[in-house]
Amino acid sequence: MDLNAIQTQITSDLAQVVSKQALEEVRVKYLGRKGVIAELTGSIPGLPAQQRGLFGKEVNALKNKLLGLFEEKEKILNSQNQDLKHDKLDIGMPGIAQELGHLHPITQIIDEICTLFSRMGFSVVDGPEVETEYNNFTGLNIPLEHPSRDAFDTFYLKDYAQLLLRSHTSPVQVRAMKTQKPPLAIVVPGRVYRPDAVDASHLFMFHQIEGFLVNDNIRFSDLKGVLEIFAKGIFGEEIKMRFRPHFFPFTEPSVEVDISCIICKGRGCSVCGRKGWLEILGAGMIHPNVFKQVGYDSVKCTGFAFGMGVERIAMLKYGINDIRLFFQNDLRFLKQF
């Protein structure tokens, strides 16, 4: 037998030992009555006379070395056990399982909406949450006398009169058009801030997604087609959609967009106020004054824009009746998504 190979195997087996029980199993394997060393010793009489003495000495040396290795390994295990006792750690107790997290429902909805628009050729763009008054208001054709520009309706930064926490994601529309030329097709997800009283449908911080498309000869029918694909992609192919005339300073004409109630299928219920319709977003054709503010040719360029509250979309999609549930960090609620 190759004694060097046996010694190598012993070293490998001992390296894998992590308990006294495993050490005893290895000891029996090599030093037991029917172990490897016993077999080697029993094979000596069958060797030629001139080889017996030398082979016996080698086997004896291997045995002594093995005994030393076992003693050293046992000391290491004893030392580790003492450390465990000192730390008062009961290794017999079951471990504490680490729960895997997952995306917040608001993040899931944002990803779902942005993916839908990406498939239609829109790029996803981010923007700063601290904005200039120009980008947030003036560039979007919102005049000085508009109520939203009042200090009670916007979070202005102290000591920085021209800076504020953006009240919508539309300022990115101004930023993008000032640095890029048409054609543009962009959606902008992000947090926005308004000093609203907190209740079941309002928060001082929430999420919006702004979208806009600018090119030559963009028509209102293009807006309708894009929003219909979006609405059916989020709420299901069976829903119906309608536009209602509205006013926004940055679009003309402007509309509010409704879908048939996903609960009662348009028949009328408590969720839709017995009307059969649910409002999901505002939209319209980009106002010529906005194009002038960013240096576009307001005669040649046309485009549409839309904006939606992400929390509202999530509440409608999942039948949630209180916006505050999204931010209370209650795992009983969050684990449902």
Image: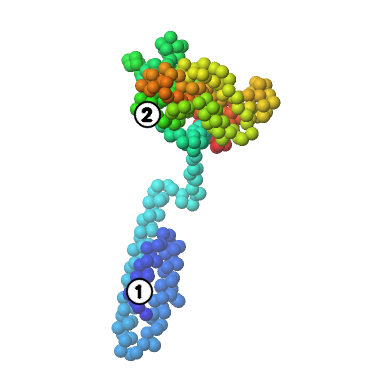
Identify the residue under disc 1.
Answer: 5
Q: Quadrant of the C terminus?
A: top right
Identify the residue under disc 2.
Answer: 181
User: Residue at the location (37% across, 66% down)?
Assistant: 12
Disc 1 or disc 2, which is closer to the eye?
Answer: 2
Question: Between 333 and 204, which is closer to the camera in this rendering?
Answer: 204
Provide residue 227's location: percent of width, then percent of height: 54, 29
Which element carries disc 2, helix, strand or loop? loop
Residue 158 - label: none
Provide residue 111's location: percent of width, then percent of height: 49, 36
Question: Between 14 and 149, which is closer to the camera in this rendering?
Answer: 149
The reply, left or right, for residue 57 in relation to residue 148 is: left
Examine the rendering and report whether any part of residue 75 can be seen. yes
Asked if marks 1 and 2 touch (Cβ < 8 Å), the reply is no
Provide residue 157's location: percent of width, then percent of height: 36, 17
Quarter occupied by residue 6: bottom left
Residue count near mark 1 (Cα–Cα under 10 Å), binned few <14, some 14–19, many ≥20: few
Residue count near mark 2 (Cα–Cα under 10 Å), binned few <14, some 14–19, many ≥20: few
N-term-proximal mark, 1 vs 2: 1
Q: CA distance from mark 1 to mark 2?
A: 75 Å
Type of amino acid at the residue the image marks with label 2: Lys
User: Residue at the location (58% across, 20% down)?
Assistant: 244
Quarter occupied by residue 143: top left
